[in-house]
Image (spheres, grey):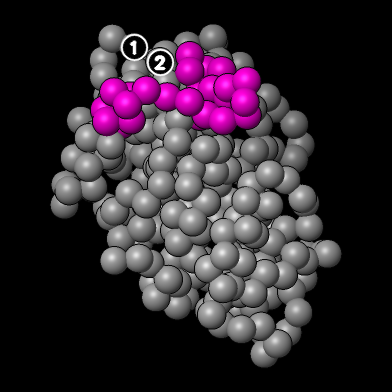
């Protein structure tokens, strides 16, 4: 059975995934630092979960490469699944964009992801900020609700609402409640996207989708599954998608 390597940070998501992995008969190792034990001492296949930089560092030390979407994926997605203009630029190019605009780094958090009222002119400048940084820029929209979707082999494996009107959608009981109608609408949109051969997807990924006020359902963004929070998603389903990010993980998918 597989091995799950977890970040040293003990948070709710890692506790839920640890329990799901143990229930499935996996070996679970919580690392104490950003270096794994020798690969020969770990039972393959190996899956890793935690902060993206942690996962990439540990995977690199083990000589494995996790699946992740291209940085320009959202800009290449057909407009029917975005419902807004999205461009993939360098930070230097984004500085000339008119405002208001939602601007975010495509692959890290080197500057705040937010709506810049003055467009690119409002982006920060400091010595450590590389002007070649991959950057996504889009027209601002209001998301009525947002849903996290764990997807493997073009099949939805787990989903949960995570935001309403830009606020965390956590209930008083600590859960993430949403209506059957909201779930059905999200699943219908995701099913349409996954069935479209024009949509290029890695074998395992997290899709964030949502309803844009006045427009309809669209894709918020895409992220590597190995570093994504699970919110109210079924941990077992999320674990399957995380495993599929790594070599040998395809054998852990339920039919």
Q: Which quarter of the picture shows residue 133?
A: top right
Q: Is residue 38 left or right of residue 223?
A: right
Look at mark 1 in the image and give the residue it sits on: 213
The foreground one among 200 and 254 is 254
Q: Quadrant of the C terminus?
A: bottom left
* Whole-percent x, y for residue 59 in the image: 62, 70
Q: Which residue is tagged 2?
A: 144
Q: Secondary structure at mark 1?
A: loop
Q: Is residue 219 visible?
A: yes
Q: Is residue 138 left or right of residue 200?
A: right
Q: Nearer the viewer, residue 22 or 59?
A: 22
Start-end of magenta stretch: 162-186
Residue located farthest toward the bottom when viewing the structure as drawn: 40
Residue 178 placement: quadrant: top left
Seen at 67% across and 69% down, the residue is 28
Label 2 crowding class (10 Å Cα cut-off): few <14, some 14-19, many 20+?
some
In this orientation, does residue 120 appear? no
């Amino acid at each position: 059975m597989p091995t799950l390597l977890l970040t040293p940070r003990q948070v709710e998501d890692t506790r839920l995934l640890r329990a799901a992995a143990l229930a499935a008969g996996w070996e679970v190792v919580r690392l104490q630092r950003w270096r794994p034990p020798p690969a020969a001492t770990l039972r393959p296949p190996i899956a890793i979960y935690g902060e993206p930089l942690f996962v990439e560092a540990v995977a690199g030390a083990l000589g494995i490469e996790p699946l992740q979407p291209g940085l320009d994926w959202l800009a290449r997605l057909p407009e029917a699944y975005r419902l807004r203009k999205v461009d993939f630029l360098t930070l230097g190019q984004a500085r000339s964009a008119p405002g208001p605009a939602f601007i975010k780094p495509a692959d890290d958090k080197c500057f705040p992801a937010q709506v810049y009222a003055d467009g690119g002119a409002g982006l920060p400048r400091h010595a450590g900020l590389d002007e070649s940084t991959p950057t996504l820029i889009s027209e601002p929209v209001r998301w009525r609700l947002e849903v996290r979707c764990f997807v493997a082999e073009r099949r939805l494996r787990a989903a949960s609402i995570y935001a309403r009107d830009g606020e965390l959608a956590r209930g008083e009981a600590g859960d993430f409640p949403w209506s059957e109608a909201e779930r059905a609408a999200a699943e219908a949109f995701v099913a349409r996207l996954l069935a479209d051969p024009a949509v290029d997807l890695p074998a395992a990924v997290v899709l964030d989708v949502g309803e844009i006020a006045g427009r309809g359902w669209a894709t918020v963004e895409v992220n590597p599954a190995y570093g994504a929070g699970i919110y109210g998603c079924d941990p077992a389903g999320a674990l399957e998608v995380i495993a599929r990010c790594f070599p040998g993980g395809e054998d852990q998918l339920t039919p």
